[in-house]
Image (cartoon, rainbow, N blue to C red):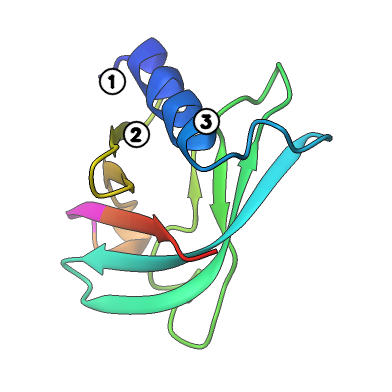
């Protein structure tokens, strides 16, 4: 089980550090370098973070030629995943366990904004 409040704090810190709290609306977007482990997928994509009250901290990574929703998770929810933010490297890390349809193994997604 994850600590949802710690995950919300990690998202808030990530948004603040990257100047994304100033964005009006319900979704903050940032181009990012995305790395999936152990799937060995690396690509640049758009990260969307819901910042409205009800869905705060839900993350969606937009699909690319390499990031395929049929192979890896692209959507993340604070109560089901573990979020960590490292301010020094400006890396948001998401840890979780894949659905059986995607291999059922533990995964780590590292996100570094490039804008």
> Which of the two discs, 3 and 1, sits closer to the camera?
3
Where is residue 38? Give x, y as percent. 16, 67
**Is residue 114 left or right of 6 when viewed as pictured?**
right
Residue at screen point 71% across, 16% down: 53
Label 1 near label 2: C-beta < 8 Å? yes
Q: Which mark is residue 2?
A: 1
Span shown in magenta: 104-108
| Picture quadrant where residue 23 is located | top right
Residue at screen point 47% across, 76% down: 44
**Is residue 97 left or right of 28 when viewed as pictured?**
left
In the image, residue 4 sits, relative to residue 31, either above or below, namely above
| Picture quadrant where residue 95 is located | top left
For the N terminus, give its image quadrant: top left
In the image, residue 8 sits, relative to residue 5, either above or below, namely below
Where is residue 85? Give x, y as percent. 30, 35
Query: Circle 3 is placed at which residue position?
Result: 16
Mark closer to the chain start, 2 or 3: 3
As helix, strand or loop, the secondary structure at mark 1 comes to loop
Mark closer to the chain start, 3 or 1: 1
Between the C-alphas of marks 2 and 1, the distance is 6 Å
Q: Residues within 10 Å of mark 3 (few under 14, many from 20)?
A: few
For the C terminus, give its image quadrant: bottom right
Residue at screen point 51% across, 88% down: 65
Determine if the magenta segment contains residue 105: yes
> Which of the two discs, 2 and 3, sits closer to the camera?
3
**Is residue 102 left or right of 25 when viewed as pictured?**
left
Label 3 near label 2: C-beta < 8 Å? no
**Is residue 59 left or right of 94 when viewed as pictured?**
right
Query: Circle 2 is placed at which residue position?
Result: 81
Between the C-alphas of marks 3 and 1, the distance is 22 Å
Q: Nearer the viewer, residue 101 or 27?
A: 27
């Amino acid at each position: 089980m994850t600590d949802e409040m710690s995950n919300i704090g990690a998202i808030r810190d990530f948004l603040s550090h990257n100047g994304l709290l100033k964005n009006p609306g319900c979704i903050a977007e940032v181009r990012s370098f995305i790395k999936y482990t152990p799937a060995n997928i690396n690509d640049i994509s758009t990260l969307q973070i819901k910042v409205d009250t009800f869905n705060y901290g839900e993350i969606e990574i937009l699909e690319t030629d390499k990031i395929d929703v049929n192979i890896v998770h692209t959507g993340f929810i604070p109560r089901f995943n573990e979020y960590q933010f490292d301010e020094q490297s400006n890396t948001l890390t998401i840890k979780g366990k894949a659905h059986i349809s995607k291999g059922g193994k533990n995964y780590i997604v590292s996100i570094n904004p490039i804008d």
